Amino acid sequence: MTTGIKLKLLREKRKLSQEELAYKIGVVQATIGNWERGKSIKVDYIPKLADILEVSSTYFMEESQPIINDPITDAIVNNETGFEITIKTPNTLFDDLNKKMDFIINQFNGVL
């Protein structure tokens, strides 16, 4: 995962706009946009980004590290009522998936 993608996903996970993050870092919004599109980030800004986005400074330099300990960002969201699974796929795959999920639910209906 590239540094720009990591930055964008972290920023969105923290519910920050590019403008808000730029203000906190001390740069203009266009700079954040450039970083997210793959332009290099000056080393001086890495500690600030890491602090605001609540990750280690080395996080942005490691290619293989998953985002926020979740390789499928926001795929499974734990909450008070259980969990939610978000699947991003072409609509054509949903028909078969829905049939399989219905089958599984019907098999366990009454067991849970």
Image: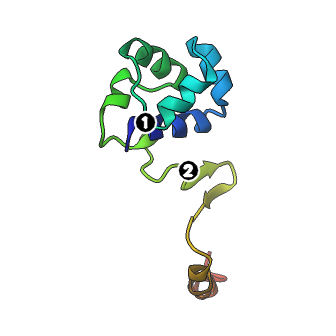
Q: Which amino acid does label 2 sit on?
A: Asp
- Write the residue at 65% across / 83% down: 109
Q: How far apart are marks 1 and 2 (CA)?
A: 22 Å
Nearest to the observer: residue 26 or residue 89: 26
- Which residue appears at 59% of the width and 82% of the height? 92
Q: Which residue is drawn at 61% across and 32% down?
A: 14
Residue at 54% over, 20% down: 52
| Closer to the camera in the image, 20 or 58 | 20
The quarter of the rendered structure image containing the N terminus is top left
Front disc: 1 or 2:
1
Quadrant housing residue 32: top right
Q: In which quarter of the image is the C terminus?
A: bottom right
Q: Label 1, on which residue? A: 38
Question: Left of 31 or right of it: where is 69?
Answer: left
- Residue tagged 2: 74
> In the rendered structure, which disc, 1 or 2, sits on the residue that comes first in sequence?
1
Residue 50 located left or right of residue 92: left
Residue 59 in the image: above or below residue 25: below
Where in the figure is residue 61, as x and y percent of width and height?
32, 29
Residue 17: mark in rendering: none
In the structure shown, which secondary structural element does the residue marked by tag 2 occupy? loop
Coordinates of residue 78 in the picture (x, y in percent): 59, 50
Report x, y in % for residue 66.
38, 44
- Under mark 1, the amino acid is Gly
Q: Is mark 1 on a helix, strand or loop?
A: loop
